[in-house]
Image (spheres, rainbow, N blue to C red):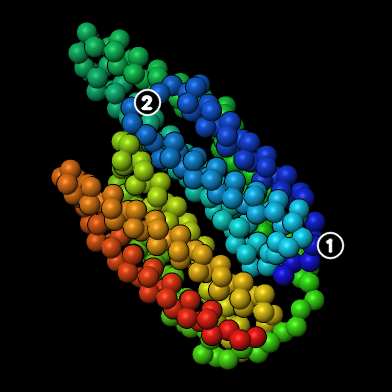
Amino acid sequence: MLDKINNKLSLLTIVVGIILLFDMGTIVSNIYVSPILEGYGLPDIFIYLKTSIFLFIFIVLMLWQNKSDFELNKSSLRIMIYLGFFTIIAYFFSLFMYKYVLLYDTAEIIRNNILYGNPNLVFDFSAMNYKTLSYITTIFGGFNSEAILFVEALIFQMFLFKSKDYVLADEKKHQYDVFLYDMYIYILFIVLAIIAFLSINLFTFRYDELGSIEMGISILGFIIVASGIIPAYNLYQSRSQSVTKSFFKGTYKLLFTLVCISLVTFIGLFILNIVFLDLNRGSYRIVSTFIGVIVSIVLAVKIYLKMSLDNK
């Protein structure tokens, strides 16, 4: 477990709180300030995921600092920092790609519908382009512009490097039996991450209500599953070493929590894809989400069995 005396995470908590305020400002801006475009773009969905993830990190950090009985191990903290860092990167990428698509569509409208199109519709298409460009300029000057996201990523990268040196509380180390380490847990996490990635609707940039819900859940599922790969690998690599009980038990608890969340997301995605099937909008994702449900159940059972055998 992390030593609460020698590890002051106040600065990290403040940074996460500021990012959270920026995210909330972006949501308010999207609702009340930015021009409303047709459908939902990927950044419109991702900002809610980013806000939820940073709210979770903020709550955990506040609990750890203010509750004496709330423990946090080093691997869990590093996973949260990784989660925040890659969420910023993913949001940055979604914003960049969405702006590119909007600018490309605007250029196509100018060429095909204004320069070479019906002159009577020039005003209508110009108004459409103005709304799109106003949306883009609003984002450029918003709380989550690329410049601000770049600074956020740099700061989180700094905390990521610093997290290697966090001081652990003195704990007795144990040599756990080899059968308590399962290589297939690590492999299944990789498989589940691939399935989660394939469950994302990668071929669309604008979504309706159901599509935006599906996209949000699928991205969340992928982020959650991908976050478990590194701790699963680190746990398996420690099979021949003496480790603390907090590391062993805490890592398994973390993995079990991640798998349970991923199971819920895959079930939700499977239900959504059944709805899409009824609406004649079915896709291959109904298969990938069903496989994801099965793999999540298998993984959850494996982790639970290993946890139940711990006798240290």
Left-right relation of 66 to 211? right
Q: Residue flagged by tag 2: what amino acid is it?
A: Leu
Q: Position of residue 94 (x, y in %)?
A: 45, 43
Q: Mark 1 points at which residue?
A: 5
Residue at image x 37%, y 34%?
Answer: 40
**Kind of residue at badge 1:** Ile
- In this view, the residue in front, 32 or 165, is 32
Residue displayed at 38% across by 52% down: 218
Residue found at the far right of this picture: 5
Residue 176 coordinates in the image, percent (x, y): 61, 88
Report the side of 99 relative to 2 (left or right): left
Judging from the image, what secondary structure is the residue with disc 2 in? Answer: loop
Q: Nearer the viewer, residue 307 or 288?
A: 307
Circle 1 SS class: loop
- Residue with the mark numbered 2: 37
Q: Is residue 1 left or right of residue 82?
A: right
User: Could you say where residue 210 lies in the image, as x and y percent from the top left?
Assistant: 31, 41
Mark 1 or mark 2, whichever is nearer to me: 1
Q: Earlier in the sequence, mark 1 or mark 2?
A: 1
| Depth order, front residue of 174/190 | 174
